[in-house]
Amino acid sequence: MSQPVIKYTLTKQGRQPEWLSSDSRAFKGQHGTSANKAGKLPRFGSPQNTIYLGIGAGDPDSDGTPDGYVGSIGSKADLQTYVTEVGTAADYHVVTSTVTGVQTSVTTGLSTAWGQEEYSGGLSTTTSSKHTASGVGTVMVLTGSQVIKVVTETNNGSGITTSTVDTPVVVDPASTKSAVSTSVGIVTTTSENVEVGVTTTVTTTTTESYSYTDVRTSTSTSKSETTTDGVTTRTDTVTTTETANYRTSYDYAAEATRLWDIYEAINS
């Protein structure tokens, strides 16, 4: 009895179907994609609105198929085509974290020179040149949005008061910010008090949208001490590391091979 590669949905109770293969090598729940077409009346309702790939426990009955069965895939080429379609729609890609910069700063001095309330010297610092490298692919670019300024103007009839709160966008020092745009929103509210009268408040909010490279900086500090003839010297080493996430293409052919190899092993 063949155990085919099938497309299926969860049961109406939100569970994996019982008619999936029980072989320990089988796969299920792979490459989920919407079961409904955008802009069309939904064919499937929740929790059956996602189609998955799996291995069925047997061939479908020509007289009828169980609830949740969508179809089968009969060749490796068709499997690759299907996975490529799903992955392209979902923007499959591979992200690899790569160290792109390392720099060290070494501070040395007698133990008595550390922790001075009023520093009077005795410490020397040497900073290495920055070692840089690059990864494979392109550095990931992320997007963000943040309120950077709120101006509140209050008029109670006897005078106007204004307050301003600035919260500028801060990205990692090693990251590059670009594609900056701003939008302004104005909200006016009024309230009435028997003692003060009518108070009008105008709130102007400025929002910044931006892109930035996915690079992060981290630091670590190590400490060592050596004592010679009763004199202790302390050395602190601060290592600054920059790490970037690189994006590369997803290997659809390799994924199709992985799944098809499982199918063939089960059916051999």
Image (cartoon, rainbow, N blue to C red):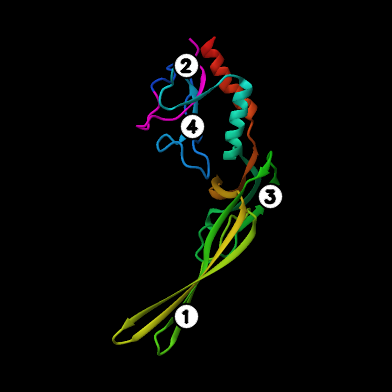
- Distance Cα–Cα, label 3 vs label 2: 73 Å
Q: Is label 2 in a helix, a strand or a loop?
A: loop
The residue at which mark 2 appears reads as: 62
The residue at which mark 3 appears reads as: 128
Instruction: Work out whether residue 217 or residue 5 is closer to the camera in this orientation and state it.
Output: 5
**Of marks 3 and 4, the one in the foreground:** 4
Reading the chain from its start, which is encountered first: label 1 or label 2? 2
- What x and y, as percent, mark residue 7? 50, 26
Identify the main secondary structure in magenta: loop
For the record, the magenta segment spans 1-17
Callout 1, which amino acid?
A: Thr
Q: Quadrant of residue 87?
A: top right
The residue at which mark 4 appears reads as: 51
**Of marks 1 and 2, the one in the foreground:** 2
Q: Is label 4 in a helix, a strand or a loop?
A: strand
Reading the chain from its start, which is encountered first: label 3 or label 1? 3
**Of marks 3 and 1, the one in the foreground:** 1
- What x and y, as percent, mark residue 194? 28, 86
**Of marks 4 and 1, the one in the foreground:** 4
The disc at residue 162 is: 1
- What x and y, as percent, mark residue 161? 45, 83
Residue 93 seen in the current view:
no
Does 224 sit above or below residue 186? above
- Distance Cα–Cα, label 4 vs label 1: 55 Å
For the C terminus, which image quadrant?
A: top right
Callout 3, which amino acid?
A: Ser
Instruction: Work out whether residue 223 or residue 142 is closer to the camera in this orientation and state it.
Output: 142
Q: Is residue 3 magenta?
A: yes
